[in-house]
Image (cartoon, coloured by chain):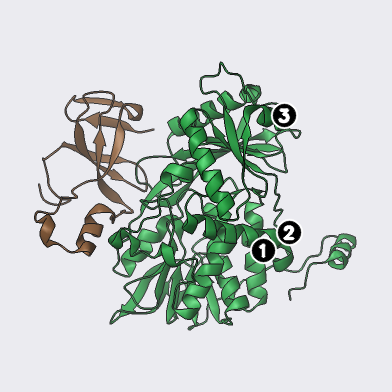
Chain colours: A brown, B green
């Protein structure tokens, strides 16, 4: 089980309080009419599915109910860092 | 030297102190093959077998980073059925089930396929409406299925709790008599041995570290045992499909999740069939050895770690005890996880890719074991003819672009 730190509640709580909410930094296309079906498919369905350190979204479902960002290893499950939503927009960009 | 198994070979080996021939040779790869299959699980080995047997392509290598059947083939709960809702899915799984029915004779290897029937329980009126709809669809598609009520279930399975006062009372079920279980390792060993007797090279302990692509065409693979060239490569690597796709510069509509299962200590026969429930989410059968085999759900987060959360195991155990209070004192023996490749529509991808000569058979998610022979069969034809087998056509990766998804999540896909 994971011990997850909620950046809003500033508490480390058991995983059972949280729900995973998918890969982070998937931005909705800015000009939805202008892009191809392939680009839509990539946005809606295609995923990076990293093996290694992976940025993902979690929601503190049984707590403050806010979404936030977590960098976690998909090999060891170790949580490397958490960040509130909007604190960064990609794996590298702060 | 490999010889056919028979009564005579059994008697001879029995009398000579179990002096069996080696089932498959341990070999080093050649530098070039017609086809390379990446992943020696059930699906990959089945692909190689049918390439050699039905497509006349014997110059095939199956490369495997671990040992044969050591991934999800050896980690699943071995349930076999074909009672899917959608025409595309039920045709594919029914094709597989029909192959299962003759597979032990075909492979000359006892895979212990046991058609002990599969019950899919319903716990409320909407469940029962869905079950009736699915059974009707199955019958129209030539798949055997009936709706049974709670009394019939109780008659067949006396230990099940059909009390109306249960938290999730059992109202009825769909029943597929031709469904059942098989020996999970057996199918990998059987396909490996039969493929190897047809000239296929099965190379274990050989991890693919790169896929070589030149001008949009696949050239070969770099492995821990050197470079191997081939014009056609089939990736059948389940949870690691995205990792292989990345080597070829591709992305997949797949996420990898841990799926857990556990077994109890061995007991006298107590459950003679397979019971599944989507609503409380648990599935259970008793193996020939006597242990209860229980399947849980997936964890929602991505993982390649072959282990999951304890709360998922707890949830599955609670579901099984709801159905079978008699098991409350049974001690669990082992628990494990496998990494499943989940597609957005709970259906597989059996498809060519944007890289010429590179094919993927993946996305089987939580329910690939039942499809093992059918999956290998249609994938072999897809690779051999560079054209999708008719049963594989709806499972093209383009469906995520065109919108032609095959939604099995709601109907049958939750508990595979």
Mark 3 lies on a secondary structure that is: helix
Quadrant where the N terminus of chain B lies? bottom right
Residue placed most toward the observer, B407 or B281? B407
Mark 2 / mark 1, whichever is N-terminal: 2
Chain letter for mark 2: B
Q: x, y percentage for residue B168?
A: 51, 23
The verdict on a common chain for dots 2 and 3 is yes
The verdict on a common chain for dots 3 and 1 is yes
Residue placed most toward the observer, B399 or B356? B399
Q: Is residue B201 left or right of residue B308?
A: right
Above or below B235: residue B344: above
Q: What residue is rendered at 27% in x and 28% in y?
A: A61
Farthest residue in the top direction?
B165
The verdict on a common chain for dots 2 and 1 is yes
> Neighbour class for label 2 at 10 Å: few (<14), some, many (≥20)?
some
> Neighbour class for label 3 at 10 Å: few (<14), some, many (≥20)?
few
Q: Which residue, given by chain and number where applicable, does mark 3 sit on?
A: B155
Mark 1 lies on a secondary structure that is: helix
Q: Is residue B294 left or right of residue B223?
A: right
Per the model, the C-alpha gap separating discs 2 and 1 is 8 Å
Q: What residue is rendered at 36% in x and 60% in y?
A: B243
Q: Which residue, given by chain and number where applicable, does mark 1 sit on?
A: B190
Q: Which residue, given by chain and number where applicable, does mark 2 sit on?
A: B110
Number of numbered discs on residues? 3
């Amino acid at each position: 089980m994971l011990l997850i730190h909620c950046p809003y509640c500033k508490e480390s709580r058991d995983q059972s309080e949280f729900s995973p909410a998918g890969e982070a930094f998937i931005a909705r296309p800015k000009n939805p009419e202008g892009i191809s079906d392939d680009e839509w498919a990539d946005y809606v369905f295609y995923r990076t599915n990293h093996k290694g350190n992976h940025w993902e979204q979690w929601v503190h479902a049984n707590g403050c109910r806010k979404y936030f960002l977590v960098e976690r290893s998909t090999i060891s499950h170790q949580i490397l860092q958490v960040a509130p939503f909007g604190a960064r927009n990609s794996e590298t960009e702060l | 030297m490999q010889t056919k198994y028979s009564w005579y070979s059994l008697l001879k080996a029995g009398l000579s102190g179990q002096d069996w021939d080696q089932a498959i040779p341990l070999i080093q790869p050649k530098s070039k093959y017609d086809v390379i299959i990446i992943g020696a699980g059930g699906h990959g080995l089945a692909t190689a077998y049918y390439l050699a047997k039905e497509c006349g392509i014997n110059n095939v290598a199956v490369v495997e980073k671990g040992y044969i059947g050591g991934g999800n083939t050896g980690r699943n709960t071995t349930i076999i059925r074909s009672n899917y809702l959608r025409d595309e899915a039920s045709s594919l799984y029914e094709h597989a089930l029909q192959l299962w029915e003759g597979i032990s004779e075909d492979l000359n290897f006892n895979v212990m396929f046991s058609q002990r029937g599969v019950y899919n329980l319903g716990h409320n009126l909407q469940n029962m409406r869905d079950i009736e709809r699915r059974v009707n669809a199955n019958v129209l598609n030539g798949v055997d299925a009936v709706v049974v009520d709670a009394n019939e279930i109780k008659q067949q399975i006396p230990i099940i709790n059909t009390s109306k006062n249960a938290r999730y009372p059992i109202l009825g079920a769909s029943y597929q008599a031709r469904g059942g279980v098989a020996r999970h390792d057996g199918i990998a060993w059987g396909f490996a041995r039969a493929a190897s007797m047809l000239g296929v090279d099965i190379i274990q302990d050989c991890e693919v570290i790169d896929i070589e692509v030149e001008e949009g065409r696949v050239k070969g693979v770099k492995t821990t045992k050197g470079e191997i060239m081939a014009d056609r490569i089939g990736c059948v690597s389940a949870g690691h499909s995205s990792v292989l796709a990345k080597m070829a510069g591709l992305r997949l509509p797949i996420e990898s999740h841990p799926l857990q299962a556990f077994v109890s200590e061995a007991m006298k026969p107590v459950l003679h069939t397979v019971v599944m429930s989507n609503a409380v989410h648990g599935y259970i059968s008793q193996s020939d050895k006597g242990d209860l085999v229980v399947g849980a759900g997936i964890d929602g987060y991505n993982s390649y770690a072959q282990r999951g959360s304890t709360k998922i195991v707890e949830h599955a155990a609670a579901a099984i005890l709801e159905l079978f209070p008699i098991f409350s004192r049974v001690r669990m023996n082992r628990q494990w996880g496998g990494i499943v490749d989940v597609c957005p529509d709970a259906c597989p991808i059996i498809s060519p890719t944007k890289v010429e000569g590179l094919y993927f058979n993946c996305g089987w998610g939580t329910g690939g074991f039942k499809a093992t022979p059918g999956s290998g069969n249609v994938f072999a034809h897809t690779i051999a003819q560079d054209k999708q087998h008719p049963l594989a056509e709806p499972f093209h990766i383009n469906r995520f672009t065109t919108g032609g998804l095959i939604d099995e999540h709601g109907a049958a896909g939750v508990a595979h």
